[in-house]
Image: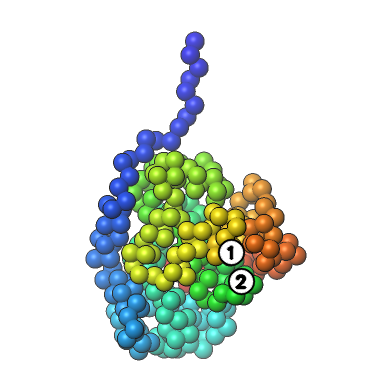
């Protein structure tokens, strides 16, 4: 008797990168204020006054910027009382990141894999906390971590049933990336880099995404280390990788304990600022 076939993921849809990227343009049309902010922050004429004027037209997004500016991350709790000051405190890159989250529906948890934001906030806070060890700005690293999983959302939007199965089947970041390539021909991280390039994000945001899987790449080391920290916090079955190996020797295990504690402390506040 022929043994039953092993269960497998639902058949993958024909993956059309151009169609997925075109869907971003459709999302932009639905969130014109967020799309305007993303475009405006790429302009040399951008100013805090102009960005706050545009931002004021989207009450939900403006309130999130205010909430983040008053969070523990910026050390300004309760002291930021105007939107223009909030834009100055968090910086243009962070405002652009929050607008990107809004226009790509990353702020709608019903359209994302389970625990997406638990992973994303852990990743972002780990990156920002570790950033000085890699001569990077914490604010820029926070943005990189928050947007790193944009490709996950795009794949999930395109194939919700199949991607949800893939997400549940393997909790490891490396395993999921391998599954994504097998199923779609592209990893979510690579898709993120393509999307950010389309929006004219700077190379400092794009290159780490392209090089995170190269263990010898220093430019990918901060994001690799952040992924390792996030995995230790969010995956009970994670098999730890020595932090020295993923960080190109910039970190030791003794450096990790304080980072884990800090991320645990701040994760819920960051999630609330991004979504509520």
Label 1 close to label 2 by CB (< 8 Å) = yes
User: Is 207 or 131 nearer to us in this picture?
Assistant: 207
Q: Residue at x 41, y 71 (%)?
A: 202
User: Is 218 or 196 nearer to us in this picture?
Assistant: 218
Q: Which residue is mark 2?
A: 134
SS of the residue under disc 1:
loop
How many discs appear?
2
SS of the residue under disc 2:
helix
- Sequence-wise, the earlier of marks 1 and 2 is 2
* Quadrant in the picture for residue 55: bottom left
Mark-to-mark CA distance, 1 and 2: 9 Å
Q: Nearer the viewer, mark 1 or mark 2?
A: 1
**Residue 56 appears in the figure:** no
Task: Categorize mark 1 by other alpha carbons within 10 Å: few (<14), some (14-19), many (20+).
Answer: some
Q: Which mark identifies residue 218? A: 1
Residue 242, x across and y down, in percent: 70, 55
Please, which colouring scheme is shown?
A: rainbow
Q: Which mark identifies residue 245? A: none
């Amino acid at each position: 008797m022929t043994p039953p076939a092993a269960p497998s993921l639902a058949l993958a849809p024909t993956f059309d990168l151009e169609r997925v990227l075109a869907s971003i343009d459709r999302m932009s049309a639905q969130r014109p204020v967020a799309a305007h902010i993303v475009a405006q922050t790429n302009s040399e004429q951008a100013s805090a006054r102009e960005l706050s004027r545009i931002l004021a037209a989207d009450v939900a997004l403006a309130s999130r910027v205010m909430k983040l500016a008053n969070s523990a991350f910026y050390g300004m709790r309760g002291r930021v009382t105007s939107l223009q000051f909030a834009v100055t405190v968090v910086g243009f890159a962070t405002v652009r990141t929050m607008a990107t989250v809004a226009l790509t529906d990353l702020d709608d948890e019903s359209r994302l894999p389970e625990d997406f934001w638990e992973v994303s906030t852990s990743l972002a806070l780990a990156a920002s906390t570790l950033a000085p060890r890699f001569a990077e700005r914490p604010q820029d690293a926070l943005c990189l971590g928050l947007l790193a999983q944009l490709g996950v959302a795009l794949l999930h939007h395109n194939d919700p049933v199949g991607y949800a199965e893939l997400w549940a089947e393997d909790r490891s970041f490396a395993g999921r990336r391998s599954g994504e390539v097998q199923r779609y021909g592209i990893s979510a991280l690579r898709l993120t880099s393509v999307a950010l390039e389309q929006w004219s994000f700077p190379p400092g945001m794009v290159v780490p995404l392209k090089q995170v899987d190269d263990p010898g790449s220093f430019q990918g080391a901060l994001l690799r280390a952040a992924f390792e920290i996030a995995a230790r916090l969010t995956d009970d079955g994670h098999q730890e990788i020595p932090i020295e190996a993923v960080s190109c020797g910039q970190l030791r295990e003794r450096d990790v304990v304080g980072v884990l504690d800090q991320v645990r402390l701040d994760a819920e506040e960051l999630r609330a600022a991004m979504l509520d």
